[in-house]
Image (cartoon, rainbow, N blue to C red):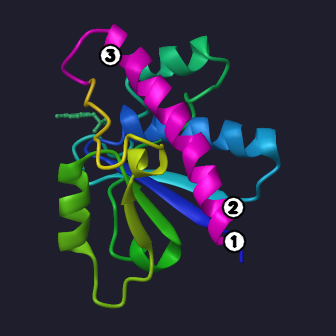
Amino acid sequence: MTPSVLFVCLGNICRSPLAEVAMREEARRVGLEVVIDSAGTGNWHAGEPPDPRAQAVAQKNGVDASALRARQVTRGDFTRFTHIVAMDADNLANLRRLAPTNATAELSLLLDHVPRREGQSVVDPYFGDDDGFDVTWADAVAGARGLIQTLRASG
Ligand code: 4NP
């Protein structure tokens, strides 16, 4: 079965869109077939493109994130995706609360897939300066690479 991954943060305009495009790029690079999407636990930014700083860091790293549009997580996501990957511990706690009883998706933190970074959160760059987005990008790429290893090990 083709794996499917939903990346989740709070607003779906900074961290999870970067994880989404980093994962697309890494999966393409290694030839892994995987369905990829992202969403936010909150709905304040629904319908919006990624934060301009997130678009800029993606662009700087050769990836276009401009076409993405934010959406909120739905209960249906818990059965539509095989994996739901949260950016931070708060997102993960909220996902566990939202999960319907018939949920089948496996929940984890992005950095659980990176050796020696298990349990760590991707820092929210929204209220910080531009440099924070370079950190987010590095975490997104490391997480994507690790997640590919996880998917290969379980597939
Ligand atoms: P994200 O960042 O969860 O990585 O998309 C945030 C975006 C918006 C807000 C907070 C975090 N906000 O408070 O609007």
Q: Residue 155 has which mark? A: 1
* Residue 10, percent from left and from top: 25, 45
* Residue 84, percent from left and from top: 43, 63
Does residue 52 show up? no
Amino acid under disc 1: Gly
Q: Nearer the viewer, mark 2 or mark 3?
A: 2
Asked which secondary structure carries label 2, the reply is helix
Q: Which residue is mark 2?
A: 152
Amino acid under disc 2: Arg
* Residue 28, percent from left and from top: 77, 43
Does residue 89 show up? yes
Within-10-Å neighbours for mark 3: few <14, some 14–19, many 20+: some
* Residue 66, percent from left and from top: 55, 28
Residue 13 lies left or right of residue 28; in this view the side is left
- Distance between the Cα atoms at labels 3 and 1? 34 Å
**What is the magenta range?**
126-155
Asked which secondary structure carries label 3, the reply is helix
- Distance between the Cα atoms at labels 2 and 3? 30 Å
Question: Mark 2 and 1 residues: CB-CB less than 8 Å, in contact?
Answer: yes
Above or below: residue 121 compared with residue 3: above
Q: Which residue is mark 3?
A: 132
**Which image quarter: residue 155?**
bottom right
**Which image quarter: residue 145?**
top right
